Image (spheres, grey):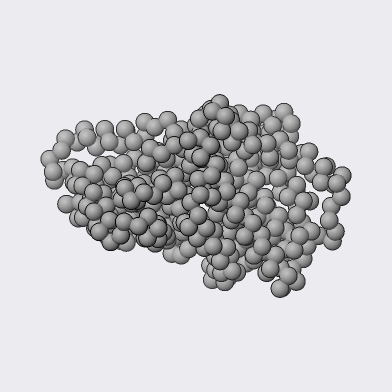
Amino acid sequence: MGILIIIAFLALFILGFPVVYAILLPGILYILIEGFPLGLLAQRITYALDSFPLVAVPIFIFVGNLMNLSGVTDRIFRFADTLVGRAPGGLAQVNIFSSLIFSGMSGAALADVGGLGKIEIEAMRKRGFSAPFSAAVTAASAVVGPIFPPSIPLIVYGSVTSVSIVQLLLAGIVPALICVALLMVTAAVLSLRHAMPRAERWPTGQEIWQSLLPALPAILAPVLMIAGMLLGIFTPTEAAAVTAVYVILISSLIYKELTWSHLWHSMLVTVRSTSAILIIVAAAALFGWILAVEQVPQDFAAMILQLSKDPLVLLLIANLIFFIAGMFLDSTTATLLVVPVIAPPMVLAGVDPVHLGIVAIFNLMIGLLTPPMGLSLFLVCSIAEISLRDLLKALAPFYIPLVVTLGVITFAPDLVLWLPSFLR
């Protein structure tokens, strides 16, 4: 019966049903056929949303929306432009560096693309960069957001697997920095090959200081959050709340650009975005419960462990599965449906669940840049007003640093687990 439920989900998804319906309808049908009380449906859905870690999701979405409206993103971009605008690649480097800073406050790839991305693409086009290249750099650098703390996908992963969310967030720091470094090298090589524009000179110390001062309060937000979690002062959910209050304070008292309309609009967008995520969480919880009742995870674990018990081989299999899932499903849906099935055999074979989380989420983020369902691709195409074909052509070289980063994450677990080891 469990296999039939999975087949029903795939059939509805291929037929074009919204993901939440494709997940929920087979679940409801299963309950009716098996004779379970309908009250069980409400119980499983409600239980899934009764999660303290998930409270961080709407808060970080709110923070990202608020920063886009209150001038925080502009100051981050100007500081990055001053600091690395002279490097080969000019604003391409600024784009990547800004994404790292912005991701330390928003935790979502699409928030990066939709907020800072608009500023970056417009600025790059004004400086003489082509629209496809500007869009490609923006889309590739947005991958960093969901693995650098705070990370909404990692919070969802932790809530599904009961793995320490603090350790997951800390585990994403080194891979994110590696990814940023490789993306910047790629941008430099491409810019030197094609003689792309950059700043005429390196900034003076005074210019760096003048651009740093306005951006410093925003830059300190991720430092405050990471330090607080490392020192055990607050949990990730509490860190989200502290970050939200901090952004409201600096936007209103320091930058003095926050208005009541900004707050209201940010809350409305947050409610819409959060609803879209949590309704999938609720539906996927019912789906996962059905798979557990039918012992699908146990059957899958036995099958996988028959193929190999080598953790490295199993990680390669997991990479393939998550990459394919990311090509068709958004990261939240893929995490909720695939992780509960994949994680048990991996952990039994000796794969660290924190390491697996970073591998899984990074694969799914690459999926945001991969047709046919790459959400970042379509959002960037809309912002830059270019065709998908032109974007994919410009994006092709940036798949190399992303795949290399994925290889490093997969084959060097000690790098991933170095910071979490301080909490063990």
What residue is shown at x 75% (from left), y 71% (from top)?
A: 195
Q: Is residue 154 or residue 250 the one in the foreground?
A: 154
Q: Is residue 34 or residue 264 the one in the foreground?
A: 34
**Vertical placement of 310 versus 132: above or below?**
above
Tell me which corner region of the image, top left, top right, bottom left or bottom right, holds residue 247. Answer: top right
Residue 51 point in image, percent of width and height = 39, 32
Q: Seen in the image, is 70 located left or right of residue 234?
A: right
Residue 400 showing in the rendered view: yes
Tell me which corner region of the image, top left, top right, bottom left or bottom right, holds residue 93. Answer: bottom right
Q: Seen in the image, is 410 located left or right of residue 380?
A: left
Residue 244 showing in the rendered view: no
What residue is shown at x 56% (from left), y 66% (from top)?
A: 400
Residue 280 point in image, percent of width and height = 37, 44
What residue is shown at x 68% (from left), y 68% (from top)?
A: 189
**Vertical placement of 246 versus 414: above or below?**
above
Q: Seen in the image, is 136 located left or right of residue 360?
A: right
Q: Is residue 144 or residue 67 the one in the foreground?
A: 144
Residue 212 point in image, percent of width and height = 77, 42
